[in-house]
Image: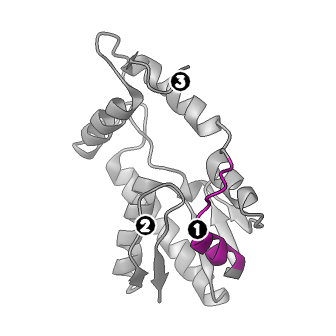
Amino acid sequence: MPKWKNISASEFGEWVDSYDNANIKETSNLESNLDKVLNSSDIIITSTLKRTIDTTQLFKSSIYESNSLFDEAQLPFPNWKFLKFTPSVWLVILRLLWFFGYSKKAESLKQARQRAKTAAEHLNKLSHEYNTVTLIGHGIMNKLIKKQLLLLKWQESKKMCNENLGYGEFSL
């Protein structure tokens, strides 16, 4: 399926599955700071989604744990066939609808927040066992986890970057 083709909302679920299962392209301009972060980590935690696991392999790092707590917050998947937009437009529309309470065939924002709280508590526990814990996760879930870490009195020492391969740093 072409990446930017106009698709219906009902086709968007297939597009997301394709995206989640696509291979990560290795580029020569990998962010060297991320490489340093991964190499200096005591443990690396990932979501269970292929792209986070592939990222660790891209940087030749070893995963300590892959856990669905860190999977991206799900998008609703309506069965609308009458509107067609590019996947990037659907991402925005469906995420906004999700924030306003629409969660057809997906976890709700309330459920995602609870999962983020559990994820933050898990990271907090691991931080008492290891000096550096690195999470390779996903945009919205990372933001929800960040909020929970801050409630647990963590400090953000490097502001989170939302770009692919971007990162933030937190300390307790």
| Place of residue 14 in the rendered image (x, y in percent of width and height, measured from the top left) | 53, 23
Of residues 2 and 154, the one nearer the viewer is: 2
Q: How is the image coloured?
A: one colour
**Mark 2 Cα shell of 10 Å, populated few (<14), some (14-19), many (≥20):** many
Residue range of the region highlighted in magenta in the rendering: 26-39
Kind of residue sitting beneath label 2: Ile
Callout 2: SS: helix
Question: x and y percent of residue 61 in the render?
Answer: 75, 67
Which numbered disc covers residue 14? 3
For marks 3 and 2, give the CA distance: 27 Å
Is 19 colored magenta in this rendering? no
Question: In the rendered view, would you say 59 is above or below 158?
Answer: above
Q: Is residue 31 above or below residue 58?
A: below
For the N terminus, give its image quadrant: top right
Queried whether the magenta region covers residue 36, the answer comes back as: yes
The image quarter in which residue 103 lies: top left
Please state which amino acid type lies under the numbered disc 3. Glu
Closer to the observer: label 3 or label 2? 3
Task: Find the residue positioned furthest to the top.
Answer: 82
Identified by mark 1, the residue type is Leu
Q: Could you tell me if the residues under marks 3 and 2 are in contact, i.e. CB atoms within 8 Å?
A: no
Mark with earlier residue (2, 1):
1
Circle 2 sits on which residue? 145
